[in-house]
Image (cartoon, rainbow, N blue to C red):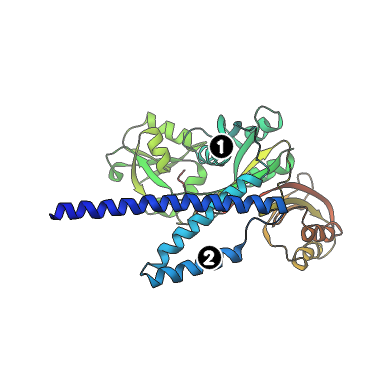
Amino acid sequence: MTETQNRDEIRAAISELDRALIDTIAKRADLVEQILEAKAQQGLPVRDREREKAVLNEAIERGKAQGVEPDLIETLFKSLFESSIQRQRTRFDSLRDEELHEANVAYLGGPGSYSHIAAQRIFERRNASVVPAPKRDFISVFRSVESGEVDFGVVPIENTTTGSISEVYDLLLGGRCNIVGEFLLRVDHCLIGRSSGLGRVTRVYGHPQALAQSRGWLASHPEIETHMAASSTRALERLLEDDDTAGVIAGADAARLFGFDVLEQGVGDHEQNITRFIVIARESRNPTREVECKTSLMFTTRDTPGALVDALTGFRDSGINLVKLESRPIPGNLWEERFIMDVEGHIEDQAVRDALKVLESHTREIRQLGCYVADAIDAVSAAE
């Protein structure tokens, strides 16, 4: 047997194992679906973290015995878990609608923007196509939802590098929209332009958020001027009109979409750069309680010493994790604040209800902003 024949036989054997692996994954997915169905019928939580941990530990030990790297086993099984979790979210979340084949969605910017990609990913999960309604600013997104022009709006509300987006919080508090979903998008900023390379770039366009999240890289290139654009799409359009001495801070997806080159990857300040988007709608319905949820609330405290601390004790005593607490000024009321809070749990959970009773006793106003399926970043990755 020649060396070529031997190599071909080995490759054929590997291909056969690959096919068997795919068949096994498909069979596993079918069995997981059966378990999800059974849990849904019994009203049981669909996620069992202790079970996931036990399965992963057993797989790692089995892999070690056969010389398989633990990191490879962990990556494989966490991907399988995440796939299952995504199906759970799709099945039970408040955006789920058997008749939702397409959705009219408003978002900031146009093709290549963060919000454009987030909107596509959100509704792809629900097997719905997006009828785009790009807007120039956040207020236009909210107004188009409130007027009924579109079904949903998708807006960024916070970023792990630059923090909360105050304008979005203010529009949410001052309007009539409800939060019906969230999506976490990992952002990998790049310098994109034409193929002449970084050395010729003298100016860079970008959305203020993209530029702010790339301060360190920009500071290391003082020869480059920065120019803000209303959206990532507008920055890319300006690049179309410019020459090869211009660039844009955006993502690899945007570069491909507009036919540009990635001149340098990883120009963002932090590797773990994640933007949280919310989905807004005029009307909302609570998801079922079988899946992990978040509840968002707005409240104002009584004007007494320690009122905020006292108001939050119910969540501590009920074992409710408070994952976000944001304050915003009340227009027209000097030095008065209202608070926005995200907690882990469904609005109908008994522990959440008990905590809310305590909150009510120390507040002047409470408003539910939304109850929706919680997202996770375990396996979510994308560029702008």
Residue at coordinates 15% horizontally, 52% vertically from top-left?
Answer: 4
Residue 126 in view (yes/no): yes
Q: Looking at numbered disc 2 in the image, what kind of residue is underneath it?
A: Val
Judged from this view, the residue extending furthest toward the top is 149
First along the sequence among labels 2 and 1? 2
> Residue 215 placed where, x, y %?
45, 52
Judged from this view, the residue extending furthest toward the right is 361
Q: CA distance from mark 2 to mark 1?
A: 30 Å
On residue 55, which mark appears?
A: 2
> Residue 291 placed where, x, y %?
66, 53
Judged from this view, the residue extending furthest toward the left is 2
Cβ atoms at labels 2 and 1 below 8 Å apart: no
Look at the numbered disc 2 and give the secondary structure of its residue: helix
Quarter of the rendering containing residue 356: bottom right
Residue 303 in view (yes/no): no
Q: Looking at numbered disc 1 in the image, what kind of residue is underneath it?
A: Asn
The residue wearing badge 1 is 127
The residue nearer to you, when weighing 33 against 267, is 33
